[in-house]
Image: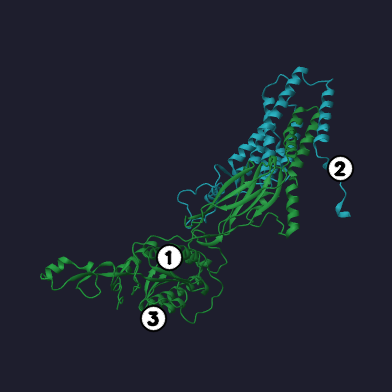
Chain colours: A green, B cyan
Amino acid sequence: MSAGAWEGRDEPWGLRPPSDGAAERARLEERARAPWAVGGLLAWSLAAGLLLLTLGGLGGRPDLALLGVPAVLGSLWGLWTRPRGEVWVDVERADGGTGGSGGLEARVRLTAPPGTEAVRLRVGRLSHGTTEALVDVPLTRVLGVSATSVRTGAQELFAVEHQGLGPGTYLTGPVGQMPAGRVVVLPRGRRMPGLPLPLRLRGLTGQHESRRPGDGGGLRDVHPFAPGDSPRRVDWRVTARRSPQLEELYVRRTVALAEAPVTLVVDSRDDVGPDVSTWSGLRPIRPDDATSLDLARQAAATIAEGYLGAGDRVGVEDLGVRRRALRPGAGRRQLDRIVHQLALLRPEGQPARRLRAPHLPAGSLVYLVSTFLDPEPAQLAQVWRRAGHRVIAVDVLPRLREQGLERRELLALRILRMDREDRLAELVAGGSELVRWAEPEEATRGLLQLARAHRRPGAGVGR
Amino acid sequence: MSPGVVDRLRALLRMTPRPGVEPAVPPAPEVRLDLAVAVPGALVRLVPAAAMLGAMLLAGPGPVGVTFGLGAAAAVTWWPGSPAAPVFLLLVALWVFSGPDLLAEPAAGGAETVRAALLVLAVHLVLRGAALAQHVGWRSLVEGRLLARIGRSVLAVQVVAQVMLLAVVWVRSGLGGPGPGQGWVRLVAVAAAVAVVVLLVPGGWLRRRPNVSAE
């Protein structure tokens, strides 16, 4: 097979479909024993070389005969050292599954039988295309493979097709294929300098000061001693100043600490990239383009990391699939659960329309992470807002590219944008707050503003 | 050559774009293999054709020969797996045969002997280059380590071939040059060639096989 015939083709190199059990095992054993195939070029070279040797000898022309010597020697050397067996390839992930490093890395382990001159490799991913290379494999070798990608979630690693080449690259071994394994690239959160709090704080533990008197927080007030107050809280200086005769004792009262219940509502129904022409699903999204779901994962992971780091309770709701809800919890393990849950989010068919909004813990701060390309998330936000939750809408639609769009596509996009902007404006008018996540600086600034312009922190707590 | 063709050639050879002609949308990222030194496949595909041109310069064919030679060079570039390279070897042999014996002068050691040695090297490079190029796509990569390994094996064969060439020169100088009464030398050479065929070529190649399709 000539190399030119392979150009631009992604199909396997003539592999047979997998068969079952014993037949497959017998086929593998047969392949392991079979000598490598002799190429047509070797036969032609050997024939031409022998012809020249004979003619040169008969004609008394050693110069003619010598022209055939390299052809004969090279061909015979290839035949003598003909390898048997096949090249084995194993692909394993190299970046430890942390993800977010800007790409995927893997190690390709190659094992070739003795006599192998080279191994022809074709490494590919669906979104990256394929890269072909001829590499030197002295029996065993580990080769690094990497691909730049900003995509997170479940995805395929690298598919590897391989073929051994015998001495002189005249002989070819059996073609093998290592299908791409599935890996989960976890989203990595960003560091947020400040995060807003819900309208009401809950509980008696946490990192946030509530308005309820209790232990752990800062000074609330100085109050006359009352039954139930601990004598250790008596402030003797204030008592001495206000009541020199000790008619009354004064105690320092502190505020209690509380936690913020946060619910991340992630809309996994859409996964659209910045290139509008890929929205139909017919064209693949570039691997260096973060989709709306990538942004949603990153936003949710960032928010979860921020709140869980402060000791708050965070839960996850999925607007696309109801079984993916994660109950509120706190701590490092809850963060791991959330990050893994976020990584597994993906659109699944046509989701059923929700008749009722998901039930959220009372007083929750709701982060609604969505593209808002349809009205359902905005309607749910209004419902939660009316129920007394503080709702922050996180818009994760990427910054769209319009290059190469046709006129009617541009018109459709314009209508869609107007519709979406109206929806977002309605959302804000209904009392929800809006943060756009497509630009990292803008998102950080938006959340920081919301954190500073806090609406009566802890209002209602302890009443 | 138009700028567009230059840019395409630069892309084929995996060179960076010319300053000022970077595309508005950068090309999509590719899968990268960690190869210390890699040569673009396009260069490797051109090696047999370059060796062919070198062999043609050394052999000095006529206009018709040049036409055939260029045709073979084009064929081996586009279809390196085709028999273009062995056919070119026969063409070179024809050109050499139509001229005087390159190793005729026993005391030569001169230009003709060097020419013969270079021709042996060139046709060898054509064959090995074609054998390698048939597995290399235009956009693929060839590892430098592999090229060095192939270069070593080419060198090993060349050492044998060039020693044989020197032996011919030495024997001829000892016998006082080609002339009558040396038929035994040819006989020995033919016998050696037949022995090589019988002993080294796999027996299965020389036996007639039953026609499977006829059964």
Task: Determine the chain carrying the residue at label 3.
Answer: A
**Label 3 secondary element:** loop
A267 in relation to B61, above or below = below
Mark 1 = which residue? A299
Q: Report the amino acid beneath label 1.
A: Ala
For label 2, the residue is B207
Indicate the position of residue A302 as horizontal and vertical percent values: 41, 63
- Counting labels gives 3
Residue at the spot of label 3:
A387
- The reply to whether label 3 and label 2 mark residues of one chain is no
Looking at the image, which residue sits at the far right?
A: B215
Judge from the rendering whether residue A10 lies leftward or rightward of residue A286; answer left or right: right
Q: Give the residue drawn at x 83%, y 29%.
A: B190
Disc sitting over residue B174 in the figure: none
Label 2: which secondary element:
loop
Q: Give the quarter of the figure containing the C terminus of chain B.
A: bottom right
Q: Are marks 1 and 3 on the same chain?
A: yes
